[in-house]
Amino acid sequence: MRMIPLFRWVLIGWLFSVCLWSVCVGEEASIVRETADSLGTISIPYGFYNDSFGVAVGYVHSVTGYPQKQAGLLGTAMVGSQGSAMAILYGQDILLPNTERFLFDPIASVGYFSDNESYIDGNPSFTGERAGSNGSDKDNFVTGDGWDNYFRLRFQYLLPIAGGKVVSFDTVALKEGLPVSKPREDPKWNPLSSGKIYLELTPFYRSQQVDGDDIESKLKTNGLDVGVFWDNRDFHQNPSSGNALNIELSRDFGWLNSSESWTTVSAEYDHYIPLSLSSAFRQSVLAFDAWTAYSPSWNEIEDGEIENRPPAFSGATLGGEWRMRGYPSNRFSDKTAVYYAAELRMIPYWNPFDYWPWLQHYVGVEWVQIVPFVEVGRVAPSWDVSELHSDMKVDAGLGLRVWAKGIVARVDVAVSEEAVGVQMMVSQPFQF
């Protein structure tokens, strides 16, 4: 459940609009001036366009260094011309009161969407095909209006071994958005002597309603994610070396108002290699990611119906802002999935925002990152290595990312055989 599909709608579209203006336009852009302080605060309106919202406006307020110096908070609300609206609250690395090792990452999202496309069964034109399967038609989706609400409370406990022997959640000293020196010694492969190990417990809840001409669907799920996370990266917001591994069990017990019980096991590994490409770049990093998921509860009965399957927005799912960015959100879902990605992350010395000091005072962009990337992945009805690595989906694209007052903001444009995907999000895409 580390993927958060609800974040698809632009949290900070304003930032990339301003970036494009500063690069391409020789005229001064107007912006509403707001407060910027030592905490690293961004508080500003923004606008964007997509198919679900139409022309939309929103407001974002984010603070880094609060309530503790390693923590951050973000809130945003948006409304579109097509009747869609959404509000999000997000916190990261918050130390629980009167504790030394317990961190807390809350997310709450409430939204109403008009004419939203969902890759679930119900389209009368594809009665003999399961929506979301690897060979499913790109038009096998249903369209409808409805509420989509999501809540997640992730608790992390830092184990007192390796890098966690001494409790330290202090921030890394930065100069122009990059560590002044190596945050720590070169990472080693042994988790008992290098990196930090966290035990994770995450209660979650999500309800999704789709009311359309062809379907009336209400899905509700609640449960727990239990995981182990080894963070062996040098600087987790924007790693330049090291690696990380996350192993997670997600379980909906079928309690309360859940639609049905289900179980998913997943694992993700990412690796970072520093490069020296050119004197024009402050930093160049080759980043790799591998992820797989399997749902042991998934059971296909005689009539082709699936019992105890995770919802299409959970489990072994590909497509959207995190994995297979050239495809629509939750385009593929099945019992199992694999995914691989490679990114070349390059930060040039050139920063277009430096030419706009009045604007830089408010947005605080310290670097711009250019990222070509490629992704391959596939879903399948069983965890079979040969099947999972045949007829794989492929996309490739280019990302533009910025570091603005302690937040990585990104826009990734990817091309696949089905579509051109534009994904806007906070944070780097691996190990969110």
Image (spheres, rainbow, N blue to C red):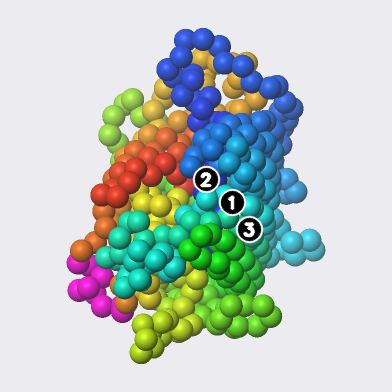
Confirm whether residue 248 shows in the render: no
Given the image, on which type of amino acid does mark 2 rest? Ser
Could you tell whether 231 is left or right of 371 in the image? right
Which label is found at residue 325?
Answer: none
Count of number-bearing discs: 3
Q: Which residue is mark 3?
A: 147
Given the image, on which type of amino acid does mark 3 rest? Trp
Mark 1 and mark 2 in contact? Answer it, CB < 8 Å.
Answer: yes
Per the rendered image, the range of residues in magenta is 382-390
Q: Position of residue 167 (x, y in %)?
A: 65, 60
Mark 3 or mark 2: which comes first in sequence?
Answer: 2
Report helix, strand or loop for mark 2: loop
Report helix, strand or loop for mark 3: strand
Q: Which residue is mark 1?
A: 113
In which quarter of the view is residue 415 placed? top left
Which is more toward the observer, 320 or 138? 138
Q: Pointer 2: residues within 10 angstroms few (<14), some, or many (20+)?
A: some
Decide whether residue 40 is among the magenta residues.
no
Give me the residue at 35% from left, 64% from top.
125
Q: Pointer 1: residues within 10 angstroms few (<14), some, or many (20+)?
A: many
Confirm whether residue 225 shows in the render: yes
CA–CA distance in space, label 3 to label 1:
6 Å
Q: Which residue is mark 2?
A: 52
Considering every residue shown, the one lying at the far right of the view is 98
Could you tell whether 244 is left or right of 115 in the image? left
Give me the residue at 38% from left, 34% from top.
370
Mark 3 or mark 1: which comes first in sequence?
Answer: 1
Mark 3 and mark 2 in contact? Answer it, CB < 8 Å.
Answer: no
Report helix, strand or loop for mark 1: strand
